[in-house]
Image (tube, rainbow, N blue to C red):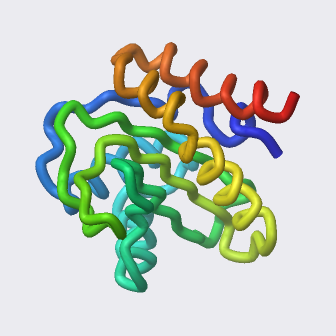
Amino acid sequence: MDLATLLKPQGVKVVADVTSKKRLMQKLSELAEGLVDLPAARILDALQDRESLGPTGVGKGVALPHARIGDLTEVRGAFLKLDKPIDFDSVDRQPVDLVFALFAPADTGVDHLKALALVSRTLRNSALCAKLRANSDPATLHTLITGAATSEAA
């Protein structure tokens, strides 16, 4: 499993109109709707259900919301870079501006955890996060994210 498989170029966006965690989850759901071919409302419900168990803001401006959803056949990702950081109830209480969401089949088992670990490892790289924050072109962001995991594995 690699990030290029999880994150397709159309799954990367830069957004300026997000001012709250609720609006962020709506944007993620709208983006994911086209990636996983499920209604945004269903995706939003799954994200909110998972978030109610505990916030997925992992610190240093990064959030990793994720959800298991029936009817999915494979793990998919979406990445949003926010123009302005928002409060996300992160573990370090810092606002979030880099968001990588994962959507997995309800019965995916270990693949979901492997994908989450891969994304987490990748976004712990402070140099990569600095590059992501310095760029606003979705294609460049996709290349940076998917290339980072490849170069770490080499």
Q: From the viewer's perspective, tell me whether residue 2 is left or right of residue 117.
A: right
Q: How many marks?
A: 0
Extreme residue in the bottom direction: 53
Q: What residue do we see at 34% from left, 63% from top? A: 41
* Apparent side of residue 23 relative to residue 96 in the rendered image (left or right): left
Query: In terms of depth relative to the viewer, which is nearer, 15 or 116?
Result: 116
- Position of residue 72 relative to residue 33, above or below, is below
Image position of 66 with respect to 149: above or below: below
Rendered image quadrant of residue 142 = top right
- In this view, the residue farthest toward the right is 154
Q: Residue drawn 57% across and 22% down?
A: 144
Nearer to the camera, 22 or 105: 22
The spot of residue 106 in percent (x, y) is 66, 74
Side of 68 relative to 100 (left or right): right
Task: Give the x, y percent position of residue 65.
Answer: 45, 61
- Residue 71 or 100: which is nearer the viewer? 100
In the picture provided, is 62 more to the left or to the right than 5? left
Residue lying at 63% horizontally and 42% vertically, measured from the top left: 122
Q: Residue 93 versus residue 52: which sits nearer the camera?
A: 93
What is the x, y in percent for residue 154? 87, 28
Against 52, residue 32 (above or below) is above
- Spot occupied by residue 119 in the image (x, y as percentages of width and height): 62, 49
Q: In this view, does 113 lie above or below 134?
A: below
Image point (43%, 20%), residue name: 138
